Image (tube, rainbow, N blue to C red):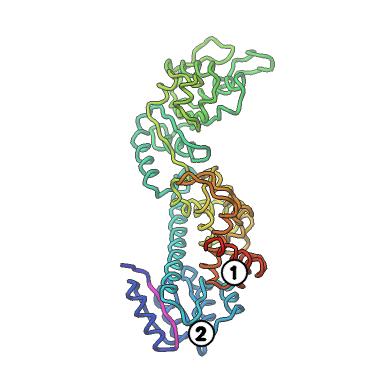
Amino acid sequence: MNTARLLIVDDEKIAVKNLGYVMRKEGYEVVTVGSGAGALRLLEQQHFDVVLTDLRMDKVDGMGILDVCQRCYPRTEVIIITGFATLASAVEAVKRGAFSYLAKPFRLDEVRKVTAEALEKVHRKQELSQLGAAMTSSPDEGVIITRDPTMLALIETARQIAPSGCNVLLTGESGVGKELFARFLHRASRRKPETFVAINCSTFNEGVLENELFGHARGAFTGAVSERKGLIESAHGGTLFLDEITEMPPSMQVKLLRVIQERELRRLGDVTPIMVDVRFIGATNRNLNEELRLGRFRQDLFYRMNVARLEIPPLVRRKGDIPLLCAHFLRLFNQRFQKNIQEIDPEVFTLLSGYDFPGNVRELCNIMERGVAMASGATLLSSHLPEDLREVVLLTLRSAEGQVSTLEERERDYILWVFQHKAGGNQTLAAQMLGIDRVSLWRKLKRYQAAGD
């Protein structure tokens, strides 16, 4: 049973009665009214998810209802219906914020589909609002944003192993959020009051990495004018996160192993052992079995670190998280850029869900940062996304079928989607939305039709 609430507005009694009957059979809670003025009174008293309104009515017309909803009820979507459809009125309605524009006589499956799509956008707005409230009450930047069952199970596993203080290995592609999980493990442990220290082992050569981790005594080498505490010592009582641990040189792996086993270290140039109490969390985007087989990662260090292991899935395997992540990044970059973007256009999600994100969550973050920086109104649009993504010219690097779509296939799919679903089969409107001339669109559609025959 669909619990969404619809308001149907039309001064033709038969039209409003018939459409109300159809939508009630779909399971919606429907209220009908025969005038624009009556609709405004109802909107003041009750909440509606979607308003389906005739365009031409006395006193208060469909555009008037649209304007009031845009100004006073931003979580309500409006669908304009008219028997006097023109391209100018369709473009004007969309520009002023209408979700869609239907011409009478419409097909019942068409109005059902458009209403369902409008409700999907309403639900997106609700998610944005709920997540924004949750993030306000819990502003920790380390929060893991997900509703994916696999990720939720991983979080629960992390929550169970966190208090033990055991060493952990995190595996997964670059950008999936391994450091986020490391911080979660730290916060959920008894070590939370102490320091969380992170280092990327692939950033430094062996000499510099040893100095970073172990520190040095005064006079240990030229320029060492004072003693320096290393990161392991700095993490005493807390957690040390070793990102890309498999990139650590073999000799450093031996020294790290000794620290883990003996719980003591020696600074460079010093003979005095220093006792340390540190939880080690390592992370890698490499295939651990392959690294062990090739001898690039020591087995004894692997056994010491692999007390527990969490494998974090790539974003392509949890695309249901994209709307939540987008909402999170929207809030983050609204604050950073001092903007007030209230919603994300559904077309943005359509484009993003068709992309496989080789850079994972980090890449999505970059895309949203660029989008918020480019946006100037209250809505983040697909036109604010990077141009290559917006035009769907990025190759799909992975797919569930293991195949790669060509650029032409991706362009075709996007053009047909705009033509059929956003412009309602109107070539002139579709060309305007796509930013190309009508003749070019006509040629493309003709070519696609010939290829399908």
Q: Position of residue 222 (x, y in %)?
A: 69, 14
- In this rendering, is residue 41 above or below 113? below
Between 39 and 202, the one nearer to me in the picture: 202
Label 1–label 2 contact, CB within 8 A: no
Q: Residue furthest right?
A: 223
Mark 1 and mark 2: Cα distance apart in space: 20 Å
- In this rendering, is residue 329 above or below 66? above
List the residue tagged with mark 1.
430
Q: What is the magenta range?
A: 5-11
Q: At x 52% / y 40%, what residue is drawn?
A: 175
List the residue tagged with mark 2.
83
Q: State how many labels appear.
A: 2
Does the magenta run of residues contain 6? yes
Badge 1 element: helix
Q: Amino acid at mark 2?
A: Gly
Q: Amino acid at mark 1?
A: Ala
How crowded pointer 2 is (Cα within 10 Å; few <14, some 14-19, many 20+) is rated as few
Q: Position of residue 92 (x, y in %)?
A: 60, 76
- In this rendering, is residue 318 above or below 22? above
